[in-house]
Image: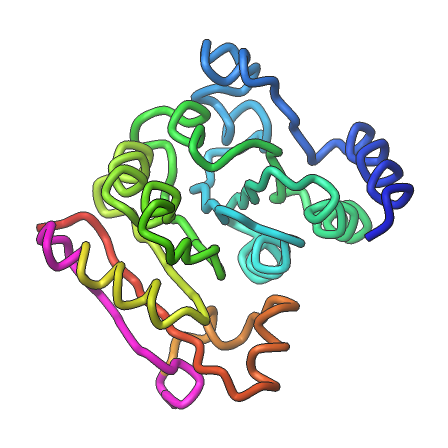
Amino acid sequence: MGSKNKLKRFKENETFSNVVQPTREQIVTKSLPYYGKWASDFFKNNNPISLELGCGKGEYTVELARQNPDRNFIGIDIKGARFWRGAKTALEENLSNVLFIRTQIELVDLIFIENEIDEIWITFPDPQMKWKRTKHRMTNPSFLDKYKKMLQPNGIIHLKTDSEFMHAYTLGILEGLGYHIMYAHHDIYVNHEAPKNVVGIQTFYESQYLKQNKPITYLKFNFQT
């Protein structure tokens, strides 16, 4: 994407009512206007909140919002020029249950209070395969602790990825910590009983992987032991 297009999208994001771009200071000091009150003060309802972490263009956030008008959906990514597409589509379709927050995933536990989130989707994260990048893997124990804090006691996490490494790594971590693995499949599109919200929605990159006959893996789990 050219720099001019990026700048244009950054400018548009500033005008979008469904985009929040907090400063690091606001996050660290927990002084965000909607902190602890995203459902009641931003969405103006008491519906459960689902997050898509590393949402990219926001395909999952937007499509899930279309299918579930009784839930609130928040896409989080540091790359505003990417989620611009999802934010714009949501506005064009008058989807009032969609929000995008531009920030680093590492700060996510400072944006929401304990038990505020009902569900988390992690879609096609960078597997960070080098050992020195382990701390950046979005399902390492440190990240899981952040998610556990935000989620309701029975809150669910979905991991959908083209990386068999990430799938296996996460399975190992979950089994080691004794967390409840609710569903696991190493090639979800060959499973005729796959959940519709997993195979019925595809990101742009996912469609490219499928054209290359690349297996897509899926995990569903919670923190019950």
Asked if residue 92 is positioned above or below residue 67 in the image, the reply reads: above
The answer to which of 175 and 59 lies nearer the viewer is 175
Residue 36 magenta-drawn?
no
Asked if residue 66 is positioned above or below residue 88 in the image, the reply reads: below
Give the total number of marks visible in the rendering.
Answer: 0
The answer to which of 176 and 146 lies nearer the viewer is 176
Q: Is residue 137 left or right of residue 140?
A: right
The image shows residue 27 at horizontal and vertical percentages of: 50, 18
The image shows residue 59 at horizontal and vertical percentages of: 63, 59
Q: Is residue 117 left or right of residue 199?
A: left
The image shows residue 167 at horizontal and vertical percentages of: 32, 66
Q: Is residue 179 left or right of residue 36?
A: left
Specify the segment rendered in magenta.
Answer: 174-193
- Residue pictured at 39% horizontal, 43% vertical: 136
Q: Is residue 222 visible?
A: yes
- Residue pictured at 30% horizontal, 27% vertical: 114
The answer to which of 158 and 106 lies nearer the viewer is 106
Q: Is residue 152 visible?
A: no
The image shows residue 183 at horizontal and vertical percentages of: 25, 70
Q: Is residue 165 left or right of residue 126?
A: left
Residue 188 magenta-drawn?
yes
Asked if residue 177 is positioned above or below residue 183 in the image, the reply reads: above
